Amino acid sequence: MHRNGRLGDLPAARGKEMGSIGGIAYHLGELRPIDEVDFLRADAKRLELYKLAGFEQYAASNLSMRELAHRSAIQTLDECGIDRDDIGYCLYVAESFDRDELVNSTEVNRLLVELGLENAVPIHISVSNCANIMSAVRVATALIESSAARHVLIASVDKASRRFAGRKMFQEMSVKSDVSVSCLVSGHDEGQYAILYLGQHNAAGMVEMECVDSASYSVPKFKSIRGAAKHARETLDLTAADFARIITNNYSQQVTKMFIELCGFPREAGCYTNISRFAHAVAGDVLINLKDLETAGALNPGDRMFLMADSVTSSSVLCLQKR
């Protein structure tokens, strides 16, 4: 895993940042109590377990994926104030194979027209599930570093399927919400956050293990998370104490705390508020949690943040520094 994963590492080893992230914005669907989730509504015992795990609400939206994506993307563009012609690409981050709406070029191009980005090149980012944002940031950073674009818009949207139990997550670690999140990836010295490192580690064989039993899956998964986090710190020659916060996906409180400790951080360095607020935004969790810390004034210039996004097969780390 690490032999292949290291080919995906992007450290700022040349003495400068690889790029920056700015204009993070998000839009939640209507917040509802988890008592209304179909697979929990008729199962009092299971519902109580979810509440004990820290879940209180989820977000549901009747907007289309395009409409939901527009709500956050327009905020990003307005906040950054970048000339639309300077945005060369739009990375549309959305799964399609297990959703009610298929991702198609017509809808994505309609979104670009509505955003005033008629000349931006659309690229669909998918199949990494909860780590999709990391894949998008990696592609955007590569486009910036190769001078293919001055700015790249990332527009991520997730809507759970309306089929029964469509909001239930793998191993029941959370409840899926309808959410969009966006940001602009630019050159260094431009956005609010300098990109210091991006590592993506994938173990494709784990997709088979998850179907066997939890123990067969959990042991190699824990090893993967620990290894990805350790490699990021060693590459940057930093310790856990050099980071102000660690930000993860919104899983249950117990699972999130375990992930944080596997990454080598104390539990108190984690972010837990949004677990109860809207549960799991799938790909968007880590950027939304970062945005909320920023809004709350919890971050200071110079602070480093360690973002870990994990999916069934992937363990991805993004290290940022606030300007």
Image (cartoon, grey):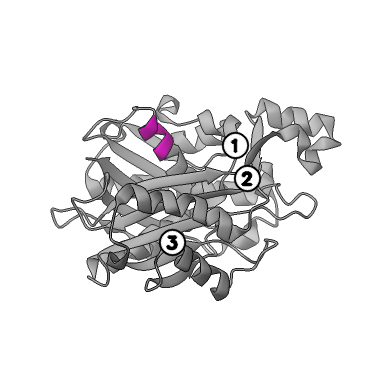
> In the rendered image, which quarter is residue 151 located in?
bottom left
Check the image and report above or below for 91 versus 50.
Answer: below
Where residue 173 appears, x then y in whole percent?
64, 41
Where residue 170 appears, x then y in whole percent?
66, 49
The main secondary structure of the magenta stretch is helix
Q: Is residue 119 left or right of residue 237?
A: right
- Near mark 3 (Cα within 10 A), the count class, few <14, some 14-19 or many ≥20, is some
Q: Residue at x 42, y 55 (%)?
A: 134
Check the image and report above or below for 266 versus 232.
Answer: above
Residue 232's label in the rendered image is none
Residue type beneath disc 3:
Leu
Q: Could you tell me how many numbered marks the image carries?
A: 3
Q: Residue at x 58, y 62 (%)?
A: 95
Mark 1 vs mark 2: which is more N-terminal? 2
Q: Are marks 1 and 2 in contact (CB under 8 Å)?
A: yes
- The residue tagged 1 is 278
Calculate the distance from the C-alpha at mark 1 to the C-alpha at mark 2: 7 Å
Of labels 1 and 3, the one closer to you: 3
- Near mark 1 (Cα within 10 A), the count class, few <14, some 14-19 or many ≥20, is many
Residue range corresponding to the magenta coloring: 290-295
Q: Quadrant of the N terminus?
A: bottom left
- Secondary structure under tag 3 reads helix
Q: Nearer the viewer, residue 104 or 260?
A: 104
